[in-house]
Image (cartoon, rainbow, N blue to C red):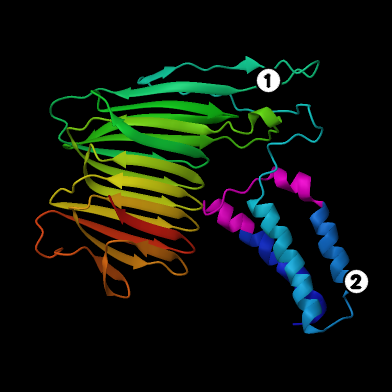
């Protein structure tokens, strides 16, 4: 490859990688970063021109370094929450479509900003989703999908399922339920309507969130499939048979209770931080296929390169099986 084609080629590769990873949910790209950081492309082009005739190794490293640094800022920067002019508001685009779920107590709170003379509307909504509990609900499955939000689950309800949500800037939680033979199924999905918005500094802490409660009586299967998400689940009060966590750039923090005869945990991530807590008295086995990820399993004995177990695992009656796969993630399992 000719040296003068190296930087343009690297830029095209980075742009293609951004679109691909964003489409598959491994990153949550902030498109407004381009409006704030567009001079980076001038810097890349300028550095490439200045050193166009220099074919030394250090010049090549410098040109590629500027490209990598620039795209790193574009991907991981969070500049979309600041307006172009300090102290002023810009615009929101919002799809104000309705969710007509029969189990949805919708309480949208669309309020006008009082920015002087700017006529800006800040859109937010809140919803309560419920599914009644019946005595024949012995098995239940919770499916969660949608990124760009925070999910919490740490309390019980006398209903089968309850969720209180907050939505901002065109996002909308959708809830459905069904029954599959003897399995009760509830689905919570966050739809992010694509649109532009720029917030004032006072709004930068606002984010979509869903606070979930489950009935402790059924045996639960929980499936989570998200992009950029923060999840905090305390499952110590529930009977968990299967827990599946799939995420791109996510933060998963999960606390398990005592296992059933078999409790299975499946974790598959891209670039994420995963922390799982298991009871000290629980027998637990961990298998990893973690690529470049880091592993920290305190209180576990290493059996081989990819397998860790608590003492006395083989003789235990009830067991937790954890399987972790990831690209560049931080995996932690601790005992409490």
Residue 289, percent across and down?
37, 68
Q: Nearer the viewer, residue 218 or 252?
A: 252
Identify the residue under disc 1.
121
The answer to whether 189 is drawn above or below residue 43 in the figure is above
The answer, for residue 11, to whether it is visible in the render is no
Q: Earlier in the sequence, mark 1 or mark 2?
A: 2
Is 29 included in the stretch rendered in magenta? yes
Residues packed near mark 1 inside 10 Å, few (<14), some (14 to 19) or many (20 plus):
some
Residue 60, percent across and down?
78, 77
The nearer-to-camera label among 1 and 2 is 2
Q: Which mark is residue 50?
A: 2
Q: Secondary structure at mark 2?
A: helix
Residue 314, percent across and down?
12, 65
The answer to whether 79 is drawn above or below residue 23 in the figure is above
The answer to whether 2 is drawn above or below residue 83 in the figure is below
The answer, for residue 194, to whether it is visible in the render is yes
Q: Are marks 1 and 2 in contact (CB under 8 Å)?
A: no
Span colored in magenta = 18-38
């Amino acid at each position: 490859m000719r040296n003068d084609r190296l930087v343009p080629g690297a830029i095209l590769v980075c742009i293609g990688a951004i679109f691909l990873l964003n489409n598959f949910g491994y990153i949550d790209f902030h498109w407004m970063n381009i409006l704030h950081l567009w001079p980076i492309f001038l810097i890349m082009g300028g550095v490439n021109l200045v050193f166009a005739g220099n074919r030394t190794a250090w010049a090549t490293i410098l040109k590629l370094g500027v490209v990598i640094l620039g795209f790193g800022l574009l991907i991981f920067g969070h500049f979309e929450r600041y307006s172009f002019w300090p102290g002023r508001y810009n615009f929101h685009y919002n799809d104000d479509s309705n969710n007509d779920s029969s189990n949805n107590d919708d309480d949208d709170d669309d309020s006008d900003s009082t920015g002087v003379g700017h006529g800006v509307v800040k859109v937010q909504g809140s919803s309560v989703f419920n599914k009644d509990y019946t005595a024949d609900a012995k098995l239940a499955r919770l499916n969660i999908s949608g990124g760009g939000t925070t999910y919490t689950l740490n309390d019980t309800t006398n209903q089968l399922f309850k969720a209180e949500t907050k939505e901002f800037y065109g996002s909308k939680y959708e809830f459905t339920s069904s029954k599959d033979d003897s399995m009760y199924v509830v689905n919570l999905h966050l739809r992010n309507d694509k649109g532009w918005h720029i917030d004032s500094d006072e709004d930068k802490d606002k984010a979509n969130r869903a606070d979930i409660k489950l009935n402790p009586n059924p045996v639960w299967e929980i499936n989570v499939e998200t992009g950029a998400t923060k999840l905090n689940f305390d499952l110590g009060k529930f009977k968990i048979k299967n827990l599946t966590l799939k995420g791109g750039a996510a933060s998963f923090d999960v606390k398990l209770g005592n296992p059933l005869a078999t409790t299975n945990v499946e974790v598959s991530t891209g670039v994420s931080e995963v922390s799982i807590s298991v009871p000290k008295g629980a027998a637990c086995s961990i298998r990893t296929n973690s690529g470049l990820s880091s592993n920290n399993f305190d209180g576990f004995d290493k059996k081989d390169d990819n397998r860790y177990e608590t003492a006395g695992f083989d003789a235990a009656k009830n067991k937790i099986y954890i399987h972790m796969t990831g690209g560049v993630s931080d995996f932690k399992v601790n005992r409490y």
